[in-house]
Image: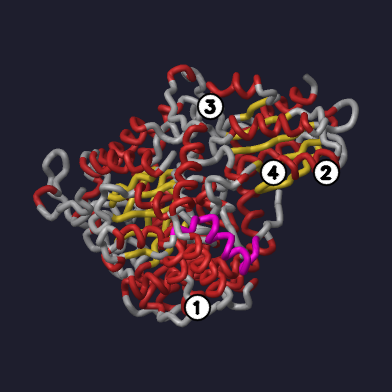
């Protein structure tokens, strides 16, 4: 899973850390997204369940990741999304954060204002997922 | 709040045009006869409708209590409690990792005081209550018993269901606390306790729902769920119980998904498989041990965030499949649940959907009306065949024991891998347009995000709940708490000691959920799954 897919075109493939931040255990969506991104040629570092901002930052540093994807279906996104962004900034890492899960439209401006680079909701297609992650990496 | 409805007036069983109809049509084993493919009762919904049990929980105990009263007022016939993520994970609301999750996706319960507020003004001797809790299930049961007994209702009178199905947590929903083996011991402790002292209580609700929501197929849901059921039977028998003493109180919980006839076949196959295995494999002789009773919930995962009103139609069709499959109780999802917790209006429409099916469509007048359909009978047989091949695999993995086979499948990540493969296959089909999802990848005109009104739980809930917990900690006798927690640790270290009495002591001393879980964790340890993508 290390080789770049032709669709990446130039440079190295995007390397993304995927994690469930917090206590929420619903990992169906994140696992599907992991495979979608891998199929699109990205390098996926899948941390899985019960991660903290600290464990995610550690993985970002170790893996030299380009982007972080966190998933939450627990309505905690307004707390946890900005917290992840702030924790990365505090660690001196300029790495965008994409949030996936159940995020009502009315929360999108607040997420954006807090520095979340992209939000993926239920029903997002593989193309939309891949495009969102690419856009987050190349603002 | 009538739990039952008298439907014995026979002249009610006429079509809308006035044609009288019989209870059952067709040949072969009748409903209420082994192997119960056609239903566990001879006259099913003619004598008693299914229980309309709506799942609710959000915010503080007081918030959810108000929703419970509303649901009972509009005709709900049983209560079902959704706990928030910290409670499900055995963490107190003031724990670091609870930040942002208190009261958001269910109700926060930290101590027995919260449990008392949750059921304030509700006669626990008259209502039946379901609690969706797994890892810390024995602790929540202890809190419920303590609240009831403080209110003068003896534990022997309590009716309800504790989900307490830890195996599917490792396979699908991932809300586990301890490693699988001590967790199964906790399940067995609850079975021993309720069998002896709470004859109206269902100690385990063996749940396929979450397996399906995590992405499994119907056949996998059927097979994994029944295998988990067999595993609990083997564990309880190994703990010294007679199968006929506890098996009549085992209950099941299935998903009702979109493919209508596949779902009906699944429910019918489940009854037949359970009856045969319980009789032939586990030697049960009480016919109640052979009868698979189940709760159904419509498929949350099938709800779309796009054009959410269309979900009303999906839910109605899924609910109908559950009823035609012979469910004992039913939760219908609210149309706005792909966006947030249900609003009161959406929850009411969901309940009304069940009432339309029950009272207007006539489907409750005849038992197993689809029985004898060539397609439905074939589908029933086919799902049974697929489930049997999974059982054979697990038996092989467990050297003849389903329990050991299930443990092996959890430890290797086999279940999680099978489910993730199926989920991805489904997603690829939707992506490729091979599978139409109305409003998502076809017929997408007409979505109006501005029209949505959502239930919001604010940060104030978390602050309030932390204050409530601090007040309980302030008022209690700390020495009594320490003594009770020391007993929990001591009893946990003795594998043959039933933990329920120590847990009852601890909750009565006002030990918090998180403190009790920490005490158990000191003996049992924790569990980290092998992440399979």
Please state the extent of the stretch shown in magenta in the rendering: B510-526
User: Mark 4 to mark 3: distance in Å?
Assistant: 23 Å
Q: Are marks 1 and 3 on the same chain?
A: no
How dense is the environment of label 3, judged by Cα within 10 Å: few (below 14), some, or many (20 and up)? some
| Label 2 secondary element | loop
User: Mark 1 to mark 3: distance in Å?
Assistant: 48 Å
Q: Which residue is mark 4?
A: A52
**Residue B374 appears in the figure:** no
Q: Is residue B512 magenta?
A: yes
- Tag 2 and tag 3, C-beta contact below 8 Å: no
**Residue B204 appears in the figure:** yes
Res. B497 mark? 1
Name the residue located 40 percent from the left edge and 40 percent from the top edge.
B333
Q: Which residue is mark 3?
A: A104
| Foreground label between 2 and 3 | 3
The x, y position of residue B46, in whole percent, is 19, 54
| Foreground label between 1 and 2 | 1
| Label 1 secondary element | loop
| Label 4 secondary element | loop
Res. A1 mark? 2
């Amino acid at each position: 899973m290390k080789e770049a897919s032709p669709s990446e075109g130039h440079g190295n493939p995007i390397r993304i850390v995927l994690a469930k931040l917090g206590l929420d255990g619903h990992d169906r969506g994140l696992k599907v997204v992991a495979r979608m991104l891998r199929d699109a040629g990205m390098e996926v570092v899948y941390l899985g369940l019960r991660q903290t901002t600290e464990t995610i930052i550690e993985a970002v540093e170790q893996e030299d990741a380009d982007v972080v994807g966190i998933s939450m279906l627990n309505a905690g996104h307004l707390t946890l999304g900005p917290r992840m962004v702030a924790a990365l900034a505090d660690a001196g890492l300029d790495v965008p954060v994409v949030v996936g899960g159940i995020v009502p439209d009315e929360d999108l401006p607040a997420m954006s204002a807090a520095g979340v680079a992209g939000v993926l909701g239920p029903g997002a297609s593989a193309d939309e997922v891949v495009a969102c992650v690419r856009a987050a990496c190349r603002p | 709040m009538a739990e039952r409805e008298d439907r014995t007036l026979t002249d009610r069983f006429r079509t809308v045009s006035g044609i009288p109809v019989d209870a059952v049509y067709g040949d072969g084993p009748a409903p209420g006869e082994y192997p119960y493919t056609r239903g566990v009762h001879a006259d099913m919904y003619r004598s008693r409708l299914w229980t309309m049990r709506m799942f609710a929980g959000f915010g503080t105990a007081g918030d959810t209590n108000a929703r419970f009263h509303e649901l009972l007022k509009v005709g709900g016939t049983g209560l079902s409690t959704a706990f928030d993520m910290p409670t499900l994970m055995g963490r107190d609301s003031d724990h670091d990792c609870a930040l942002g999750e208190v009261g958001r996706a269910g109700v926060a319960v930290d101590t027995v005081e919260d449990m008392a507020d949750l059921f304030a003004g509700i006669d626990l001797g008259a209502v039946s209550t379901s609690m969706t809790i797994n890892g810390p299930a024995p602790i929540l049961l202890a809190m419920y018993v303590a609240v009831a007994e403080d209110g003068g209702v003896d534990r022997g009178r309590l009716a309800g269901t504790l989900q307490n199905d830890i195996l599917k947590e490792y396979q699908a929903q991932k809300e586990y606390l301890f490693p699988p083996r001590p967790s199964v011991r906790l399940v067995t402790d609850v079975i021993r306790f309720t069998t002896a002292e709470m004859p109206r209580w269902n100690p385990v609700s063996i749940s396929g729902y979450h397996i399906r929501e995590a992405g499994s197929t119907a056949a996998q849901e059927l097979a994994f769920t029944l295998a988990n059921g067999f595993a609990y039977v083997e564990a309880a028998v190994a703990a010294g119980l007679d199968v006929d003493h506890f098996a009549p109180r085992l209950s099941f919980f299935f998903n009702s998904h979109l493919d209508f006839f596949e779902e009906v076949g699944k429910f019918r196959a489940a009854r037949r498989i359970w009856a045969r295995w319980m009789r032939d494999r586990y030697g049960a002789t009480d016919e109640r041990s052979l009868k698979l009773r189940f709760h159904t919930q419509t498929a949350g995962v099938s709800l779309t965030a796009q054009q959410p009103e269309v979900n009303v139609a999906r839910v109605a069709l899924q609910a109908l499949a559950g009823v035609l499959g012979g469910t004992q109780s039913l939760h219908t999802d609210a149309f706005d649940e792909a966006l947030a917790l249900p609003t009161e209006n959406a929850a009411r429409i969901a309940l009304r959907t069940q009432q339309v099916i029950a009272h207007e469509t006539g489907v409750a007048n005849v038992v197993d009306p689809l029985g004898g359909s060539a397609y439905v009978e074939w589908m029933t047989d086919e799902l049974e065949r697929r489930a049997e091949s999974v059982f054979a695999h697990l038996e092989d993995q467990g050297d003849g024991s389903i329990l050991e086979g299930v443990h092996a499948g959890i430890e290797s990540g086999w279940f999680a891998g099978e489910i993730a493969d199926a989920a991805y296959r489904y997603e690829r089909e939707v992506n490729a347009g091979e599978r139409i999802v109305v409003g998502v990848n076809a017929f997408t005109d007409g979505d109006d995000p501005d029209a949505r009104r959502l239930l919001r739980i604010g940060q104030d809930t978390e602050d309030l709940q932390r204050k409530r917990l601090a007040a309980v900690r302030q008022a209690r006798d700390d020495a009594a708490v320490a003594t009770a927690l020391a007993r929990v640790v001591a009893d946990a270290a003795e594998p043959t000691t039933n933990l329920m009495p120590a847990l009852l002591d601890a909750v009565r001393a006002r030990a918090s959920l998180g403190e009790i879980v920490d005490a158990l964790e000191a003996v049992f340890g924790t569990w980290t799954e092998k992440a399979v993508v």
